[in-house]
Amino acid sequence: MRLCFDPVMCPKAVLPAALNIAKAAGFDAMVLHCAFTASSPFHPDASVRMIRDYFDDAGVALMGLHVRDLTGVNRRGEVASNFRQVEWDIHLARALRLRCASFLSGARSREAREVLVSGVHELLENIPDVTLNVGNGVDTCLESAADFDALMPELPERAHVWLNAMDVDNAVGIVDKYVERIGMVTIGEDDVDVVRALKANGYDGPVVLNAAGGSAADLRVRVEEVLT
C-alpha cells in the first residue's frame, strides 16, 4: 500500500506549500483534486509542466486525481452528463503521468445511475489506456454495500472503486468482497480496521489519509503500525 496525503487537510495551500506540508508530515505520495483546494491543477498560476516539476523537485509521487463528477444537474433541475468535461480531466490526468482518474458516482436517482453507467463505458472505450475509480458518497447512487452489489456488475472491468471508508457503512465487508476492483481508498481517523482488511486481502494500491481536523502525521503513524 502507498499512503497518500490528502490536500483537503490544507485547502488554502497552493501546490508547493501543500507538498511541503505533506513532506513535513512524513508522506512521499499525494493526490490532487480538480476542485475544493488551492493546490488544484486548475489553479491559474499552474501548468502541467510546473505541476510535474513541483512533484519531481519535492520527491513526492502523484498517485491520483479527483476529477469533476460525471453527472450533474442542469439549469432546469434535470440530470445531465458532464462527459466532455470529465474527458478533458482524464486527459489532464494522463498529462500528469497518471493512468487513472477518480470521481463520485452522482445523485441517488435512476437517471443519474444510467448516465453514470453509460458514461463510464463510453469514456473507457474512448480512452483505452486508463482506468476509472468510481467513488461512493452520501446521497449518491453508490452509498451502501447493497448499492455496490447492484452497480458493480454493470460497470466494465476497467472501472474500479474509489472507496471512501468515511462515507459508507461496512467498509470492511466491501473490501472483503470487492478488493480486486478497488483502485483507491480514502480513510479517516476511525478507519484503521479498514486498513487491516486491506492488508489481509492483499490490496497494494493507494490509501489516502484524511485526518479531518486531526493530525495527518499521527494518522500515518497509526496506519504504518498496522502494516508492519
Image: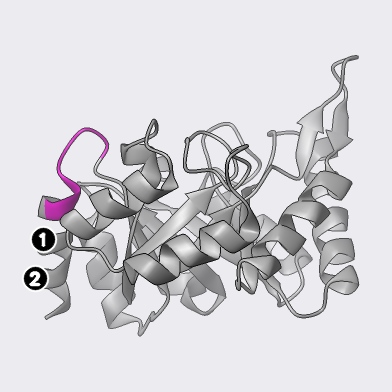
Residue 222 got which mark? 1
Is residue 163 rendered to the left or right of residue 159? left
Residue 176 painted magenta: no
What count of labels does the image hold? Answer: 2
For the point 77% across and 72% down, the residue is: 156
For the point 25% across and 63% down, the residue is: 27
In the image, which residues are magenta? 212-217
Is residue 132 among what the camera can see? no
Neighbour class for label 2 at 10 Å: few (<14), some, many (≥20)?
Answer: few
Residue 176 got which mark? none
Is residue 22 rendered to the left or right of residue 217? right
Question: Where residue 142 sits in the image (x, y, percent)?
Answer: 60, 47
Is residue 163 rendered to the left or right of residue 30? right
Position above or below: 226 against 129: above
Q: Callout 1, which amino acid?
A: Arg
Position above or below: 172 against 32: below
Q: Secondary structure at mark 1?
A: helix
> Is 219 or 8 nearer to us in this picture?
8
Per the image, the residue denoted by label 2 is 225
Quarter of the image that includes the C terminus:
bottom left
